[in-house]
Image (cartoon, rainbow, N blue to C red):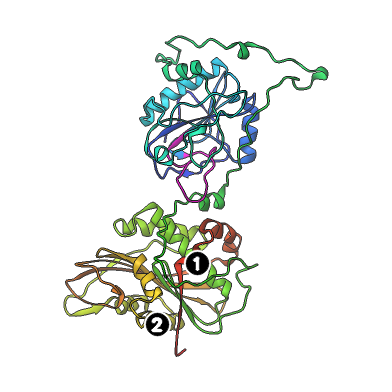
Amino acid sequence: MARCPFAVWHPISGSSGPHVSGPFKIVHHTTEGSSAAGALAAFAEKKSDPHFTVDATRILQHVDTAEGARALRNAQGGVQTNRDSAVQIELVGFAHLPKDPRALTQLARLCRWIEATHGVPKVWPAGVPRPAKNGRDPGGHNRDAQTWDGQSGHYGHCHVPENTHWDPGYNDSEMAFIMGAEFDAQGRLASPALAPSRAARKPPVKSRRGKAPASAPRSTMPDHSDVPTGFEAYVHNLPLRRVMPFPGAAVQKVAKRRSSSAAGPTQKATEAAVNVGALLGFVDGVSVQDKDDVLYSVQLAQFGASGAFDRFTETQAWYGKYTEILENLGWATEQMAFSRFDQQEGEFRMDQAALAVITAIATQGQLGVLQASMSALGKLAEDDGAIRLFDFHSSVQGSGNFQLGAVQRSANGALTMALGAFYFRSVDERRRFLFFKWGSRQLHFWTAAQRMTLNADFYARRRADVLARLEADAPKYIANLKLGGR
């Protein structure tokens, strides 16, 4: 918890989630308006809250600095912005005009608190903000993603990757004051004050009939973009880590959208697919839309978990995130409870051991399709795209992490999945590890299994957000298998 002791707590839309990367940094904005009230109304409307709003008389805090604010654009892919340990301050004023010295004094005091609380140095890693040129964007802003993600210090909105705004537009004297101002224990300015500029001292010209001032300043910057909230924000802000499939991987083109999870024809035959590091089988009667929903939700869970934790070295934490994402997508599930699979002597194969674990939770139909799926995968030639895709994403340098699942529509219409989760450490690296005959001392193998149910109506309302987050290349990670004899 980090709340400024001399700020007024004033929550609006809530945070964008906990910080996920980067050293702490201070980001300077201007509200592009003349009043805090106008800024607060805009934040509420667009869900674009900063951590703090500062004017001449007070400091308002909207979000705890331990979590991300909402005032930055965060594009899909690339670096994090709001959640990159960025403490964001909106100063009431305009980027192209001089700032109120009283507001800058409040701002400087707040900066000293953030610097002390979060260890932020008094430096501008991307350079100082540029003042306006002829009242407009001066250009030449350094938005280097590596600098942003790796160096602590002060940044303007003009320095943030994936953003186009050029605030705060400080001039030289404003910059020197903000960085040099010091305060005593009571919060009083202990260094020289900043004299107001001529433009800042000039009163606005009032219009007739009590309307807004005729010369009221107008922003020369485009409006802030809306920031998503709720589930949309959760999916939008998931840090995804995707390793592109190797060239030549066999993939299935999966339909992007349909009107509902029950829509579309049912499959004529049992099908299965490799989906990143998971092998999933589908019992007869599962619709095409159901299949897509399962494949995409499981794929997002894998990429989102890998964006937060290493799939092979932080496996338990990886599965915690994997489960969290599935739950947020509408799957009723529990945390994976892993146990070590012990075989004291002789040889064993992971496919057979995995099936033995799943048998306890699977229906006959699910067990049958999973056996057929694994048999089909095991019969593929070593250079087949599906087996290479599975091995490539589920094992590396003697470590592995994979899932096996079978999906079925139950008699009451619910979409259920029997899912086995597995990870291992071995003495060496093997291709086709799932079907290799391992000695009992060559491998450490951990297993977990559970039944899961998808709330189809819940997921259907969020399907578009999932597809948008995965973008158009999602099918590149899916390879269909043809199952024979069923």
Taking the magenta stretch, the answer to whether it contains residue 122 is no
Q: Is 344 situated left or right of 400 in this image?
A: left
Q: Pinpoint residue 432: horizontal percent, then vertical percent.
A: 30, 75
Give the quarter of the figure containing the N terminus.
top left
Q: Marks 1 and 2: CB-CB under 8 Å? A: no
Q: Secondary structure at mark 2?
A: helix
Q: Quadrant of residue 25?
A: top left
- From this view, report whether residue 171 is shown above or below residue 412: above
* Residue at numbered disc 1: 475
- Mark 1 burial class by Cα count in 10 Å: few <14, some 14-19, many 20+: many
Please report the bounds of the magenta region as a residue range.
68-87
Of labels 1 and 2, the one closer to you: 1
Q: Is 47 situated left or right of 318 in this image?
A: right
Q: Main secondary structure of the magenta part?
A: loop
- Mark 2 burial class by Cα count in 10 Å: few <14, some 14-19, many 20+: some
Q: Residue at x 44, y 56 (%)?
A: 304
Q: Residue at x 25, y 63 (%)?
A: 397
Say which amino acid is labelled 2.
Ala
Q: CA distance from mark 1 to mark 2?
A: 20 Å
Q: Residue at x 51, y 41 (%)?
A: 15
* Residue at numbered disc 2: 376
Say which amino acid is labelled 1.
Pro
- From this view, report whether residue 105 is shown above or below residue 23: above
Q: Secondary structure at mark 1?
A: helix
Q: Pinpoint residue 347: horizontal percent, then vertical percent.
A: 20, 79
- Dot 1 or dot 2: first in sequence order is 2
State whether residue 144 appears in this view: yes
